[in-house]
Image (cartoon, grey):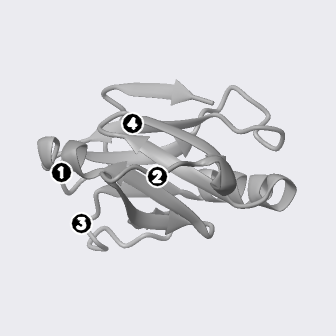
């Protein structure tokens, strides 16, 4: 996973499947402080949800693909295989005061340029 902020070098980790914005990372940190550790579940290629780690029931196909703000990010290996060429940006939907319950979105981006391209498609989930 790649960390996205204003100082990111354009050559950094172009192979990363998911780029995470500072806003998403900060929202997850705040949420974890209030509600405990969260599990992020990626429905590849364009959806993400989170829930307390204790409530997430992992299947035989779920694998941890990284961590954001000490929260594990899970994806289904079958989906990862089907969408091997897809890259995405994990961000906070700007229309909500995220300090309460952030709305996260995972938007698709072309391979290798995920932090420089506007969203093509996205799904917002709670």
Distance of label 4 from label 1 (alpha carbons): 13 Å
Of residue 57 and residue 100, the one placed in the foreground of this image is: 57
Tag on residue 107?
Answer: 4
Distance of label 2 from label 4 (alpha carbons): 24 Å
Of residue 74 and residue 6, the one placed in the foreground of this image is: 74
Which residue is drawn at the image coordinates 28% and 57% (left, top)?
17
Give the mark nearest the N terminus, 3 or 1.
3
Q: Quadrant of the C terminus?
A: top right
Left/right placement of residue 81 relative to residue 31 reads left
Distance of label 2 from label 3 (alpha carbons): 29 Å
Tag on residue 58?
Answer: 2
Give the mark nearest the N terminus, 2 or 4.
2
Distance of label 3 from label 1 (alpha carbons): 8 Å
At label 2, counting other C-alpha atoms closer than 10 Å, the crowd grade (few under 14, some 14-19, many 20 or more) is few
Question: Which element is circle 1 on?
Answer: loop
Count of all numbered marks drawn on residues in the image: 4
Quadrant of the rendered image containing residue 112 = bottom left
Q: Can residue 6 be seen in this view?
A: no
Distance of label 2 from label 1 (alpha carbons): 28 Å
Across and down, in percent, residue 84 comes to: 14, 49
Which residue is drawn at the image coordinates 42% and 66% (left, top)?
66
Q: Which of marks 2 and 3 is in front?
A: 2
Distance of label 3 from label 4 (alpha carbons): 16 Å
Residue where numbered disc 1 is placed: 111
Disc 2 and disc 1 in contact, CB within 8 angstroms: no
Give the mark nearest the N terminus, 3 or 4.
3
Q: Which of marks 2 and 1 is in front?
A: 2
Residue where numbered disc 3 is placed: 14
Across and down, in percent, residue 1 comes to: 38, 65
Of residue 53 and residue 124, the one placed in the foreground of this image is: 53
Q: Which of marks 2 and 4 is in front?
A: 2
Question: Which element is circle 2 on?
Answer: loop
């Amino acid at each position: 996973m790649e960390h996205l902020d204003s100082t990111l070098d354009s050559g950094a980790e172009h192979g990363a499947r998911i780029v995470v914005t500072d806003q998403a990372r900060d929202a997850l940190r705040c949420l974890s402080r209030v509600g405990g550790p969260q599990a992020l579940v990626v429905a590849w290629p364009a959806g993400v949800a989170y829930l307390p780690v204790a409530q997430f029931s992992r299947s035989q196909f779920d694998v941890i693909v990284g961590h954001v703000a000490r929260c594990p990010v899970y994806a289904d290996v079958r989906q990862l295989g089907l969408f091997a060429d897809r890259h995405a940006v994990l961000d906070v939907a700007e229309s909500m005061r995220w300090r309460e319950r952030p709305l996260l979105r995972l938007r698709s981006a072309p391979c290798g340029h995920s932090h420089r391209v506007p969203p093509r498609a996205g799904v917002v989930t709670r």
